[in-house]
Image (cartoon, rainbow, N blue to C red):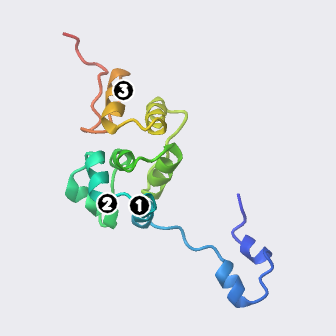
């Protein structure tokens, strides 16, 4: 892990240079999302449609006025077309655990993100494997009665 004082070791000759070189604070979840949307040239309404989130709730997450659960953040990650590492960063910034290689469900989700599958396709795959889906409250086939 990098030392948080590395900027001082770069040979700052003046206080102004030291202040210019210091790390800026990490962006909030809202700032990170808005910056990511801007860098990718994505429209919020298109992302929200792809995320299958309630429109009002999604705008509140993006504005930073509402906290989201891990699954709601995952929905947003699919809507934004994020890769695994970016989705993990989104999750962490949202105050939840990043995707874990030790969790079967997370591996399926990461696989879908990396292959740019849709949220619906990911939920179908999760369902077929008996894992909790991302949408609709984490429905699962486990324990379901076969007709």
Q: Choose between 117 and 70: the one closer to the eye.
A: 117
Image coords of residue 83 (percent x, y): 49, 44
Q: Residue at x 45, y 39 (%)?
A: 113
* Above or below: residue 38 compared with residue 54: below
* Relative to 22, 84 lies left or right: left
Question: Disc 2 or 1, which lies upstream in sequence?
Answer: 1
**Dots 2 and 1: beta carbons under 8 Å?**
yes
Q: Residue at x 32, y 59 (%)?
A: 43
Question: Crowding at label 1, few (<14), some or many (≥20) Cα neighbours within 10 Å?
Answer: many
Image coords of residue 70 (percent x, y): 38, 47
Q: Residue at x 72, y 65 (%)?
A: 3
Image coords of residue 57 (percent x, y): 24, 57
Q: How many angstroms separate mark 3 from mark 1 (CA)?
A: 27 Å
**SS for tag 3?**
helix
* Above or below: residue 127 compared with residue 49: above
Image coords of residue 125 (percent x, y): 36, 26
**Dots 2 and 3: beta carbons under 8 Å?**
no
* Relative to 77, 2 lies left or right: right
- What residue is shown with label 3? 125
User: Which quadrant holds the C terminus?
Assistant: top left
- What residue is shown with label 2? 61
Q: Choose between 112 and 135: the one closer to the eye.
A: 112
Q: Disc 2 vs disc 1: which is toward the camera?
A: 1
User: Which quadrant holds the N terminus?
Assistant: bottom right
Question: Crowding at label 2, few (<14), some or many (≥20) Cα neighbours within 10 Å?
Answer: many
- What residue is shown with label 1? 33
């Amino acid at each position: 892990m990098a030392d948080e004082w590395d900027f001082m070791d770069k040979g700052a000759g003046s206080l102004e240079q030291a202040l210019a070189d210091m790390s800026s604070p990490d962006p909030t979840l809202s700032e990170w999302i808005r910056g990511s949307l801007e860098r990718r040239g994505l429209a919020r309404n298109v992302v929200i449609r792809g995320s299958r989130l309630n429109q009002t709730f999604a705008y509140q997450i993006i504005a930073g006025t509402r906290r989201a659960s891990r699954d709601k953040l995952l929905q947003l990650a699919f809507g934004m077309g994020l890769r695994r590492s970016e989705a993990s960063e989104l999750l962490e910034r949202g105050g939840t655990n990043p995707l874990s290689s030790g969790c079967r469900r997370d591996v399926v989700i990461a696989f879908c993100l990396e292959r740019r599958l849709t949220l619906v396709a990911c939920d179908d795959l999760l369902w077929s494997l008996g894992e909790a889906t991302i949408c609709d409250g984490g429905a699962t086939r486990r324990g379901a009665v076969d007709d």
